[in-house]
């Protein structure tokens, strides 16, 4: 089993986040993550800790990306099993970068669970039983949030389409550009401060 886990990690270790800013994960990465999810699901606590310990920050992004795809595909195919697999992918990543980065993906899975008619809290709690710390704490504390702060909208995502065309789209925050007058005043004050030094 260790050799299979090592080969699965080899399938994702060379991926870099900037390569996938605008496109989906390659099929080989998805196959590797599927193998890791299967191994993680059937392992004991020590083995789960070893699997999560192999996740490096340089390729940790593949697990949230997989979770996003799982949340979308669960709705498209009306397949609740994908939700659990997405959460297990996040459990493997185990908040290795920052627990706050996991929250938008948890909200997508939570929302998708409700859309396919599954109790989201039940899915989250079942995965929490197999997750290790610190992700277990993140997962359970997400359920303690109020309904509004669990919504995809609170993370600047919105739903698009129905059925086979369902997707989550990130809404960029609007950036307010300063007026020309404000820019001139700031420039003047900056130059004045330099002269007074």
Image: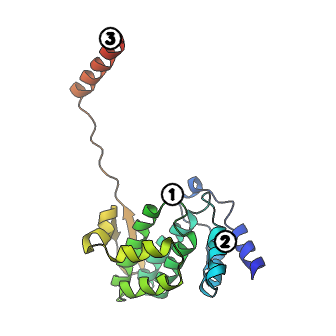
Instruction: Judge the density around disc 1: few (<14), some (14-19), many (≥20) Cα neighbours within 10 Å.
Output: few
Residue under the image location 43 percent in, 71 percent down? 138
Report whether 91 appears left or right of 76: right
Instruction: Judge the density around disc 3: few (<14), some (14-19), many (≥20) Cα neighbours within 10 Å.
Output: few
CA gap, disc 1 and disc 3: 47 Å
Q: Where residue 145 appears, x then y in whole percent?
A: 30, 72
Residue receiving disc 3: 196
Determine which of the numbered discs, if any, sits on residue 22 in the image: 1
Mark closer to the observer (2, 3): 3
CA gap, disc 2 and disc 3: 61 Å
Compared with 22, 41 (above or below) is below
Report whether 90 appears left or right of 161: right
Residue closest to the eye, 160 or 181: 181
Residue under the image location 28 percent in, 17 percent down? 188
Q: Where residue 45 appears, x then y in whole percent?
A: 61, 82
CA gap, disc 2 and disc 1: 18 Å
Write down the quadrant of residue 4 in the picture: bottom right
Q: Residue furthest top?
A: 195
């Amino acid at each position: 089993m260790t050799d299979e886990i090592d080969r699965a990690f080899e399938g994702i270790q060379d991926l870099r986040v900037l390569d996938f800013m605008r496109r989906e994960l390659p099929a080989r990465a998805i196959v590797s993550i599927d193998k890791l999810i299967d191994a993680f699901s059937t392992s004991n606590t020590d083995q789960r800790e070893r699997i999560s310990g192999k996740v490096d920050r340089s390729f940790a992004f593949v697990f949230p990306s997989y979770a996003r795809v799982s949340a979308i595909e669960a709705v498209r195919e009306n397949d609740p099993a994908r939700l659990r697999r997405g959460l297990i992918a996040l459990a493997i990543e185990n908040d290795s970068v920052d627990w706050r980065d996991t929250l938008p993906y948890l909200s997508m899975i939570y929302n998708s669970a409700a859309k396919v008619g599954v109790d989201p809290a039940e899915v989250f709690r079942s995965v929490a039983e197999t997750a290790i710390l610190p992700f277990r704490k993140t997962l359970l504390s997400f359920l303690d949030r109020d309904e509004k702060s669990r919504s995809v909208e609170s993370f600047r995502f919105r739903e698009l389409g129905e059925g086979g065309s369902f997707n989550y789209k990130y809404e960029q925050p609007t950036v307010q550009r300063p007026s020309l007058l404000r820019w001139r005043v700031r420039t003047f004050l900056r130059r004045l401060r330099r002269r007074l030094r």
